Image (cartoon, grey):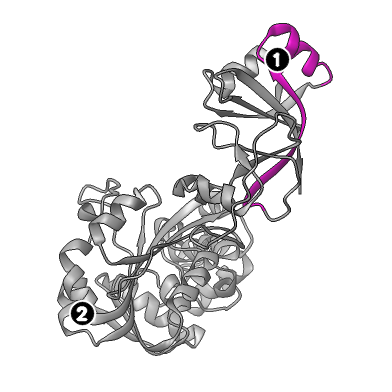
Amino acid sequence: MINEQTWDFIRRHAADDVRKLALQGTKDADIDLPMALQQIAGRQTALKKLPSWAAVEGVLYPPHLNMEQCSSEQTARYKARLAGSGNTYVDLTGGLGVDFYWMSQGFTNRYYVEQNAELCELVEHNFRTLGHACSVCCCDTATYLPTAPHADVIFLDPARRNEHGGRTYDIRDCTPNVLELLPLLMSKADKVILKLSPMLDWRKAVDDLQHVTEVHIVSVDNECKELLLVLQSAASPLRLVCVNNSQVFDASQPAPDSSFILQGDEQFLYEPNASIMKAGYFEALEQHYPVRQMSANSHLFLSPVEIDDFPGRRFQICAISSTNKQALKEALKDISRANITIRNFPMSVDQLRKKLHLKDGGDTYIFATTKADGAHCLYICRKIG
């Protein structure tokens, strides 16, 4: 697919700025410059997103949009834990093959299905380069599924763009429409794993799909990336798992009630990570940890003790101030810059920053919120951990 002169150019300029290379061009007619630039840019993205692939020479990368949309190695490895191992694994929406590569590792028979012929060709090359044996079928999901072998696991990542290129989120608007295929899917696999938009209401998705036994909300660096649903025919209590990097909080695990009553002198403030915020299972946090919400709509938690394994950010409270001008002046007298978070508060971050005359950044963290009694206040904190 790429001649040796082009590969040599790629190697020599692997760390260079792609935009500058494009402007400079090349006088060597044997070099396929557009392809070279695509490979250099792709590998630079892969160094962070797919380090295991980036370490292998000869892996080919698709255009920028495909690289931006594909899973990261980190999230793919997490999904591999959900897939487990067995005899047969089928990916009905193969794409670039990142999820397929890691999720199918534990299976004897691996079937990659993708309707885009160029991607199929790229994936076949990459899997040969990576030493990952599989069967590649270039066809659409609806055509392949009726003749598919029975699988231990079937995986789908429905396309979330309509025919005009606009983003879609509802399951019915994705391609393929999983709801239409659901009876056949459940008959063809012991377990079906769906990757959906993190914008989707997971409760509605559970209601729509009916066979959901597990919900996994996956974040990377506190940014919600994926909503994963595990479907199985056998009924079981719903399991809800919230993940941020290596931190996993299983909200459905039983825990002793760690209830206490807020006294107003708590020294620590906790902010749940993005996955827990998406899940909305705040009561589970109060059962698993000695924390209490300061108010129903703040989603900020207080505790008299420091909790090392709390799934989110941890802060020590330095001061609490009302929004009274004199009180604010006293509380902020030695502070010139701060990181401001707004939760259930009648001002935006920019408005509050302007009012407080504070620059952004620094070691001080201010949480502006409304307490249970309706009073507006500022928690002035320092980050711990």
Q: Secondary structure at mark 1?
A: loop
Q: Nearer the viewer, mark 2 or mark 1?
A: 2
| Label 2, residues with CA under 10 Å away: few <14, some 14-19, many ≥20 | few
Q: Secondary structure at mark 2?
A: helix
Q: Give me the disc on residue 161.
A: none
Range shown magenta = 310-334
Residue 247 seen from this side: yes
The percent position of residue 191, horizontal first and vertical second, equals 33, 77
The percent position of residue 113, horizontal first and vertical second, equals 28, 77
The percent position of residue 226, horizontal first and vertical second, equals 43, 57
Q: Which residue bears the numbered disc 2?
A: 187
Reply above or below: 366 against 321.
Answer: below
Sequence-earlier tag: 2 or 1: 2
Reply above or below: 24 against 347.
Answer: below
Kind of residue at disc 1: His
Q: Quadrant of residue 293?
A: top right
Kind of residue at disc 2: Ser
Residue 323 among magenta residues? yes
How far is the residue under mark 2 from the one under mark 1?
A: 63 Å
Q: Nearer the viewer, residue 327 or 21?
A: 327
